[in-house]
Image (cartoon, helix red, strand yellow):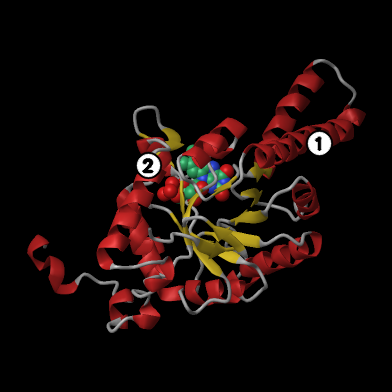
């Protein structure tokens, strides 16, 4: 028997596969199914500031159509936010009763700092850890990257004052100096970094002349960006690392562990291959470890990170050069 356990965010997980934030983690039933199929932890579907804003706008439209006095806006604001939060805290409480794996709450920090005060309620509801899904698309051309990056540190500092549970930060790779940013974020006292989130991206329907959503789900080839950066940053950060995006099977899981990930998060593969894919991934990992005589993840984790590589330049190569010369 091989030992698949891993340490992540100060918790011992029974294996390195976490069900990432998605529709599967938005209900107790979904979370139970993930546990049954071997998930070592779940990250709940994020609570979204935008989502509340949409709900709020709809109700306001209805209210003003019905001749409701605008003075009541504050009431609606308070009421809707309260309702949404109550549903979220109930999901945490009920999931904690229904499963024995860690339940990680997730907050989507898009615009404001308002969310920091809600974090405490998620901790009180029983969340084992908190993942901050943080991303500001750098479209404000008048602000420098330094100004934009400051917002990440300010939010971390504010949330750290609110909760004592471990905090993980899920980021994108849109930073002008990505490696340095990852390192600095890891030194803020957060317990983990999730590399990387995948975002809604626009596409065009050229018949209807409309903006539509492009591929929502990742494909296995999307693994390469997180694989490269996990490999480059492993051993150079002061917190745990979870790999996210493009982990679709057991081979991808093994690659991320070799790169130095402490855990992986999966979402798209659950939609494409079903939740039983987690059990299949764990079987592949177990068999591979058995074949190579590894007894635990520590026997091989990070052995292909850049820091331990005999060919560190391979991780930094960005131009194709001769490999694809025949493809012109
Ligand atoms: C349908 C769907 C819903 C998602 N919802 C969230 C979310 O609420 N919060 C979040 O941080 N990530 C969310 N994600 C992103 C995933 O957690 C994950 O980071 C991303 O899909 C990349 O991993 P993958 O290649 O395994 O899908 C969602 C992904 C999908 C496909």
Ligand 1 is within 8 Å of the C-beta of the residue at disc 2 = no
Q: Residues within 10 Å of mark 2 (few under 14, many from 20)?
A: many
Where does label 2 land, which residue? Answer: 277
Where in the figure is residue 312, as x and y percent of width and height?
Answer: 32, 82
Q: Nearer the viewer, residue 166 or 95?
A: 95
* Position of residue 167 measured from the top left corner of the image (x, y, whole percent): 66, 61
Quadrant containing the N terminus is bottom left
Foreground residue, 248 or 78? 248
- Answer above or below: position of 111 versus 158: above
| Label at residue 82 | 1
Residue at 43 percent across and 38 percent down: it is: 275
Residue at 58% across, 71% down: 239
Residue drawn at (55%, 45%), measured in percent from left and top?
21
Earlier sequence position, callout 2 versus callout 1: 1
Q: Seen in the image, is 116 located left or right of residue 267?
A: right
Q: Is mark 1 within 8 Å of ligand 1?
A: no
Can you say whether 35 is above or below 197 in the image? above
């Amino acid at each position: 028997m091989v030992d698949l356990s891993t340490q992540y965010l100060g918790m011992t997980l029974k294996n390195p596969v976490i069900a990432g934030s998605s529709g599967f983690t938005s209900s107790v039933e979904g979370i139970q199914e993930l546990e049954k199929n071997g998930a070592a932890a779940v990250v709940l579907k994020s609570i979204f500031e935008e989502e509340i804003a949409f709900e709020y706008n709809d109700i306001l439209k209805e209210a003003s159509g019905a001749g409701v006095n605008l003075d009541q806006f504050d009431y609606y604001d308070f009421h809707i936010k309260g309702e949404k939060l109550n549903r979220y805290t109930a999901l945490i409480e009920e999931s904690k009763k229904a499963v024995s794996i860690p339940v990680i709450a997730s907050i989507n920090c898009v615009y404001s700092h308002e969310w920091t005060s809600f974090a405490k309620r998620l901790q009180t509801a029983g969340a084992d850890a908190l993942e901050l899904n943080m991303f500001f698309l750098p479209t404000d051309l008048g602000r420098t990257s330094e100004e934009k990056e400051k917002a990440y540190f300010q939010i971390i500092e504010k949330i750290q004052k609110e909760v004592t549970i471990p905090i993980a930060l899920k980021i994108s790779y849109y930073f002008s100096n990505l490696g340095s940013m990852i390192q600095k974020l890891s030194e803020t006292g957060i317990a983990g970094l999730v590399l990387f989130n995948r975002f809604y991206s626009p596409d065009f329907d050229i018949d209807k002349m409309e903006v539509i959503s492009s591929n929502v789900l990742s494909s296995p080839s999307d693994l390469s960006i997180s694989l490269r950066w996990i490999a480059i940053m492993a051993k150079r950060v002061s917190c745990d690392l979870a790999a996210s995006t493009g982990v679709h099977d057991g081979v991808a899981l093994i690659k991320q562990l070799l790169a130095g990930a402490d855990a992986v998060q999966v979402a798209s593969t659950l939609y494409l291959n079903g939740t039983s894919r987690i059990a299949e991934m764990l079987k592949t990992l177990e068999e591979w470890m058995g074949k190579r005589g590894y007894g635990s993840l520590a026997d091989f984790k990070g052995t292909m990170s850049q820091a331990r590589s005999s060919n560190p330049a391979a991780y930094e190569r960005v131009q194709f050069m001769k490999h694809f010369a025949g493809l012109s």
